Image (spheres, grey):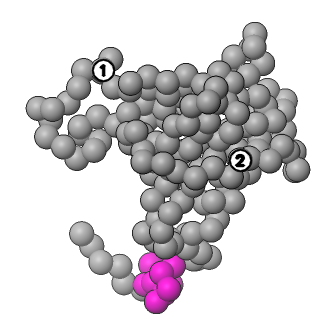
Amino acid sequence: MNFELDPVEEIAVVAEGEPGRRRFFLVTQGHGQAVTLACEKFHVQGLVTRIGQLLEAQGMKAEEGAAKAGELKPEEPRWAIGEIGIGYHEDRKMFVIVAREAGAAEAGEAAASEPAEDDRSTLRLWLSPNQLRAFSQQAQHTLSAGRPTCQHCGLPIDPAGHPCPAANGARPIF
């Protein structure tokens, strides 16, 4: 199932659950259609980093107080994101976020049920620079609401603390 929201009316990253056990969702709405996709924290982190790079490359530095991102609530996810990327369409002066459904290998399923590359669902979201800035700020805010990171090693700190390798602590080897 493929979706294209051109343009997006609202977009947000939503996290549910306690820090350390949160589930992340990309939630968007446009043309009377709402789409919720499950994603991983690293998808959001990578997307936020790339948004900053693209805005800078286009001479559209992030501005504080950009348009506000929506307060969307996740529905049942249509599918889990396996790949996500972003690009800039020069003629339209708009950004496009493209998400592709996770394959069986990414979802941890048997390889026999792997759909053909072209059979995986995709989502294309078209955003203006102001929408992209607002989305990036909202996503960063959602990410920062998680566990604090250790100032020495950068690993997340659980409520009970953590054995910091930089402070000569012990970490379990798996």
Query: Dot 1: what SS?
Result: helix
User: Residue at point 24% right, 21% down?
Assistant: 116
Image quadrant occupied by the N terminus: top left
Main SS of the magenta part reads loop
Q: Which residue bears the numbered disc 1?
A: 119
Residue depicted at 88% across the width and 50% down the height: 65
In the rendered structure, does residue 166 fall within the stretch colored magenta?
yes
Instruction: Find the magenta span and give its range.
Output: 156-168
Residue located at (57% from left, 31% from top) = 33
Of residues 47 and 122, the one drawn nearer to the viewer in this rendering: 122
Q: Residues within 10 Å of mark 1 (few under 14, many from 20)?
A: few
Q: Quadrant of residue 120?
A: top left
Along the horizontal axis of the image, is 15 left or right of 53? left
Look at the image and say whether residue 55 sits in the magenta stretch: no
Q: Position of residue 168 (x, y in %)?
A: 45, 85
How far across and how far down the image is residue 88, in percent? 68, 22
Q: Which residue is mark 2?
A: 70
